[in-house]
Amino acid sequence: MLIAAIAATSPSVLAATADDGPAYGPELQGFDYPAPVRQFAFTSQGEAMHMAYMDIRPEHANGRTAVLLHGKNFCAATWEGTIKVLSAAGYRVIAPDQIGFCKSSKPARYQYSFQQLARNTHALLESAGVGQATVIGHSTGGMLAMRYALMYPQQTEQLALVNPIGLEDWKAKGVPSLSADQWYARELATSADKIRGYEQATYYVGTWRPEYEPWVQMLAGMNRGPGKQQVAWNSALIYDMIFTQPVVYELGALKTQTLLLIGDKDTTAIAKDAAPPEVRAKVGNYPALAQLTLKALPNAKLVEFPDLGHAPQMQDPQAFHKALLDGLAALPASR
C-alpha cells in the first residue's frame, strides 16, 4: 500500500524530496483509507454534495455507535488506530470526512458554519440508521462535536473531546483576524516541509516517527494535485469558520456527559503566528484551558497526558486508547 511505502521511507530522504511526493486529486483520489469508503449524497445550500465516510461493524457488537470527527489537518483515515480499538471493543464506528475535507465535496461557494457541519453529520447518521451515538472529536472536530451535542442533545449519548480547539476566543485575546483571501494565499503556499514542521512542533512535541509521514503526504499531496486551488479555497473558508466561531461562550449549556482528553504540551491557537509575541505567549495554554473547560462544563471528567501534544491518539496510541475506553466505560450515557 502507498501508506506503508511512505511510512517506510527514512525521514532524511523525505525531507530532501519534500515537494516531490505523491499528487492526489481534490477529493483525495489515490490515497487509500483503512476501510471501504461510502458516500452520502445530499443537497446543501442548493448544491448537490457528498460526504465520504467509513462505517465499520464490529465482530462482537456492544450495541453502541461511536462517531469520529476529525480535525482541520486530518481526515477520517487518520483515526485508523482508534477505529481498530473501538471496533475491537464492540462499537460500530462511523468516521466521516466533513464537507471541504479529504474525500468529500469541496464546493466553490459554501457558507461554512459548525451548525451546518453538524446538520450534515446528523443527516448522515440518520441515513445510516443511527439514532444515538458517542461522539468523539479531535481538534476542530472537538468544536464540531460540541456544536453537535448542543444541537442534538437527545442523540448524543456521550462526548469525548481530544485537544479540542475553540476553548478560547483568539480574536478577543489579540490575535489578528485574517481575511479569507489571506488564508487562501497561505494555503496555496503550503508544502510538505511546512506541514511537517508544524506537526512536529505542535502535535508531537518536537519528536518525529515514520508513521506520522503518511498524514503529511496526505495533505501535501492534495496541494500538489490538479485541484490545488479548490482545496486551498475550501481550507481558507474553514479556517475563517474556526477563527470566528469559538465555542467557549457556550460551554455551560453543554449538558452531555463529557470526557476531556488533553495533551498538555499542545500549544495550538489559530493564526497565532500572525500575532505579536506578547499575544502568542498567552494563547494555546492547554493545561490552563483544560482546567477552565472542566469548570465550565456541567458534566465533565478530565484525563491529562503531561508529555503529549495536540494529537495524543497518534503520539501515544496505547496510553490514549486505554484512557478513552476506560473513560467512556466510567462515564454515564445520556439517554
Image: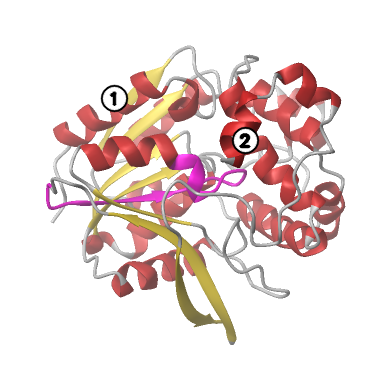
Dot 1 alpha-carbon crowd within 10 angstroms: few under 14, some 14 to 19, many 20 or more: some
User: Quadrant where the N terminus lies?
Assistant: top right
Where is residue 17? Give x, y as percent: 84, 30
What residue is shown at x 64% (from left), y 54% (from top)? 30
Q: CA distance from mark 2 to mark 1?
A: 25 Å
Give the labeled residue for mark 1. Answer: 323
Contact between labelled residues 1 and 2, with CB atoms less than 8 Å apart:
no
Q: Is residue 68 magenta?
A: yes
Position of 87 relative to 262 (above/below): below
- Which stretch appears magenta? 62-79
Model colouring: secondary structure
Q: Nearer the viewer, residue 117 or 228?
A: 228
Looking at the image, residue 175 sits to the left or right of residue 158; the answer is right
User: Quadrant where the C terminus lies?
Assistant: bottom left
* Secondary structure beneath label 2: helix
Position of 134 relative to 19 (above/below): below
Position of 40 relative to 2 (above/below): below
Q: Is residue 160 magenta?
A: no
Give the labeled residue for mark 2. Answer: 214
Q: Quadrant of residue 36?
A: bottom left
Where is residue 266? Give x, y as percent: 56, 24
Dot 2 alpha-carbon crowd within 10 angstroms: few under 14, some 14 to 19, many 20 or more: many
- Number of labelled discs? 2
* Secondary structure beneath label 1: helix
The numbered mark, 2 or 1, whose residue comes first in the sequence reads 2
Looking at the image, residue 321 sits to the left or right of residue 225; the answer is left
Position of 105 relative to 90 (above/below): below
Q: Amino acid at mark 1?
A: Ala
What residue is shown at x 26% (from left), y 42% (from top)? 87
Q: Quadrant of residue 202?
A: top right
